[in-house]
């Protein structure tokens, strides 16, 4: 059982209160006495330090320091067996901290951070590689009191010197967007003792993000990096050694990776790990596309599949393994925010600078027809960057939002219509693939933007043909994107789908060499400085998240409001305003989502019930049933 919720911050004095001799006070003047007491009070206040096992800026922690196990796991889950899944394309590296090469699936599975999160308390962070953290109320710095029993995968100790080395490494060789984010926050990292490290923060950095950002540093070994002459900025098939429960066991480029549970894992018996890390091995099989992967699943080549094809889910799950009860097909509740899955414009292209062009293109994607004809009615339309949550902007802005938006309108950074219009939602189309009402509206928008139809039916401006290339690497998307392309052609746009292999798609996306492509990601429930990587101007030509090329001063200003929010109410208002403005920019054509996980797996895996809505957890807290596995082997369902 878990004890009642503790307070997020416990306070202790950094120094004992100084004594006060009454006999000496007689000789002090009244004014001097008052000034002396005020000075002592200020000194005491300055010395007040918070010591805690966890941190939640806006509220209480769900777990006390001495909890027995996480509420959403089975603490008695057995250990053993293997779970296997699939990944698309190929890989040639295990270094996920560089933009070079294609990192293998689960490349960071062996890496642990100073702080961690729990699935049922997603906005808090807790000590993991530390026992406690200390910080003043203004969070000018944070001290991590590190555990003295943390060891690397090879059994060597991990210390504060390694943590400082890791910070310095990322600041010199890390991705530019990472260096920019960390550099704006952390002024200095100091090793106070072998197991005590201080992160000192920049005074103008957002207070809310400081501790979480510092605690997000992984545990690397300085000696290992030096012994292996490892360069963080280079692709490498040698995985970076970590402290985690799993480590690389074997690999076969381009088809397979296997990770094995470390039998000497330092944290195996900690309360936080009861009922977790249950599989002896985790295997990933690579396939060229989802169709080939599905056929392999039916043949038993791997054992767990998250199904992302509505067609396959609706029509493909009729095979002997399923009909004989060897395979289970389930829909598991998903309480996460919806993905921002969408076609995105590359705003670096001049032809997409005019929002009327972007709106016209968006009108030609018929979600309603796609959902009925292609998706078997399984999906809902993505409408917001914070869909499926109370952070989504709805209707016209309220008074609090207007207070943030009005100054941006006054500065000429936003159109005045943002103050009165309802939040932009995707257009609704009819039951036919080509919605003629939307076609007429799109045609008028392009006419207004100067893209006129010529005698050949194609649109030009200043002699240039309006062309759009869709970059994609998934054959499964052909049936979705090609009708979109056909609708654009009817509008007079020379549209084409260019399906390339995964390596080409990765390379071209990194170089922003595309017109439109599919992009996805999930925003945070308490978004903050990570928004700069998604939508900020600073990293527009460096971030792999801001594929769209959003570089807008109004968006930058609203991101600052989000990061500086000091209450949940302020945060909600700022996110509503940001969501409203992002949607009004129309740099995306929203696709679809569903609020459930559609999964299939061979009937030898089990999970705690009810399953937590914020984590599917198959690689975290599911477990292997050896008797069921033997029955599947005996039946010939698995090799």
Image (spheres, grey):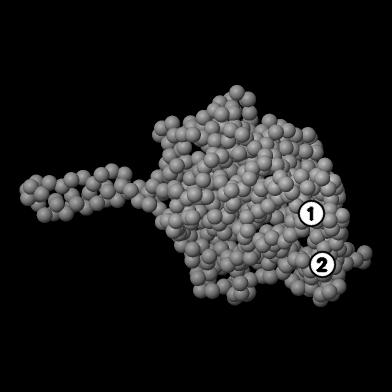
Determine the image quadrant of residue 616.
bottom right
Q: Position of residue 496 (x, y in %)?
A: 86, 56
Determine the image quadrant of residue 107.
top right
Q: From the viewer's perspective, tell me whether residue 562 is left or right of residue 617.
A: left
Q: Which mark, by number, is residue 58?
A: none
Observer-side mark, 2 or 1, equals 1
Q: Residue sitting at 66 percent across and 48 percent down?
A: 623
Question: Which residue is the extreme one toward the right?
Answer: 456
Q: Position of residue 183 (x, y in %)?
A: 52, 42
Q: Residue sitting at 73 percent across and 33 percent down?
A: 250
Q: From the viewer's perspective, tell me whether residue 344 is left or right of residue 210.
A: right
Residue 401 visible at all: yes
Few, some or many residues within 10 Å of mark 2 (<14, 14–19, 20+): some
- What residue is disc 1 on? 327
Disc 1 is placed on an element classified as strand
Q: Residue sitting at 78 percent across and 47 percent down?
A: 631
- What residue is disc 2 on? 376
Q: Viewer-proximal residue, 28 or 215?
A: 215
Determine the image quadrant of residue 277.
top right
Residue 442 visible at all: no
Q: Viewer-proximal residue, 124 or 216?
A: 124
């Amino acid at each position: 059982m878990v004890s009642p919720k503790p307070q997020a911050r416990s306070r202790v004095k950094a120094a004992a209160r100084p004594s006060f001799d009454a006999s000496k006070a007689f000789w002090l003047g009244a004014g001097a006495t008052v000034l002396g007491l005020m000075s002592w009070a200020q000194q005491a206040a300055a010395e007040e330090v918070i010591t805690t096992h966890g941190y939640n800026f806006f509220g209480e922690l769900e777990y006390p320091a001495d909890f027995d196990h996480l509420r959403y796991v089975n603490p008695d889950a057995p250990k053993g067996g293997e779970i296997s899944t699939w990944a698309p394309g190929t890989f040639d590296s295990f270094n996920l901290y560089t933009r070079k090469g294609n990192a293998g699936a689960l490349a960071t599975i062996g890496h642990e951070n100073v702080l961690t999160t729990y699935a049922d308390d997603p906005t808090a962070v807790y000590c993991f590689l530390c026992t406690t953290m200390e910080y003043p109320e203004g969070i000018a710095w944070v001290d991590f009191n590190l555990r003295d029993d943390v060891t690397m995968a090879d059994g060597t100790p991990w210390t504060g010197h390694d943590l400082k080395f890791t910070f310095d490494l990322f600041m010199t060789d890390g991705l530019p967007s990472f260096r920019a984010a960390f550099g704006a926050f952390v002024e200095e990292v100091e090793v106070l003792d072998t197991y005590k490290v201080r992160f000192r923060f920049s005074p103008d950095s957002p207070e809310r993000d400081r501790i979480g950002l510092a605690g997000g540093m992984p545990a690397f070994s300085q000696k290992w990096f030096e012994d292996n002459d490892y360069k963080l900025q280079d692709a490498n098939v040698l995985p970076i050694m970590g402290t985690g429960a799993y480590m690389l066991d074997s690999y076969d480029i381009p088809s397979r990776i296997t990770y094995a549970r470390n039998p000497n894992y330092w944290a195996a018996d900690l309360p936080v790990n009861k009922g977790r890390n249950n599989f002896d091995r985790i295997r990933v099989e690579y396939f060229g596309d989802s169709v080939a992967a599905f056929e392999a699943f039916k043949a038993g080549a791997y054992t767990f599949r998250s199904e992302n094809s509505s067609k396959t889910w609706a029509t493909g799950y009729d095979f002997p393994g399923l009909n004989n009860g060897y395979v289970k097909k389930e829909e598991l509740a998903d309480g996460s925010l919806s993905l921002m899955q969408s076609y995105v414009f590359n705003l670096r292209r001049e032809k997409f600078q005019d929002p009327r062009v972007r709106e016209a293109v968006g009108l030609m994607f018929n979600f309603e027809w796609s959902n009925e004809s292609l998706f078997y009615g399984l999906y809902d339309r993505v409408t917001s960057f914070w869909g499926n949550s109370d952070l989504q902007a709805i209707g016209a802005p309220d008074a609090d939002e207007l207070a943030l938006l009005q100054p941006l309108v006054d500065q000429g950074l936003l159109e005045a219509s943002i103050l009165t219009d309802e939040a932009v939602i995707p257009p609704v189309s009819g039951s036919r693939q080509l919605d003629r009402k939307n076609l007429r509206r799109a045609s008028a928008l392009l006419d207004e933007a100067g893209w006129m139809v010529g005698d050949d039916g194609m649109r030009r401006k200043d002699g240039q043909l309006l062309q759009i290339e869709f970059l994609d690497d998934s054959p499964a998307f052909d049936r979705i994107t090609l009708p979109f392309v056909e609708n654009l052609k009817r509008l007079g746009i020379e549209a084409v789908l260019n399906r390339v292999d995964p390596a080409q798609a990765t390379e071209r996306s990194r170089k922003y060499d595309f017109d439109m492509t599919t992009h996805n990601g999930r925003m945070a429930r308490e978004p903050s400085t990570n928004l700069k990587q998604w939508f900020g101007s600073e990293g527009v030509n460096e971030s792999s998240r801001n594929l769209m090329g959003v570089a807008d001063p109004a968006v930058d200003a609203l991101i600052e409001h989000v990061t500086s929010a000091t209450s949940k109410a302020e945060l909600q208002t700022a996110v509503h305003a940001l969501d409203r403005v992002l949607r009004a920019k129309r740099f995306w054509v929203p696709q679809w989502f569903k609020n459930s996980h559609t999964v299939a797996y061979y009937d030898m895996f089990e999970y705690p019930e009810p399953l937590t809505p914020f984590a599917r957890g198959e690689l975290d807290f599911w477990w292997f049933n050896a008797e069921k596995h033997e029955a599947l082997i005996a039946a010939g369902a698995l090799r």
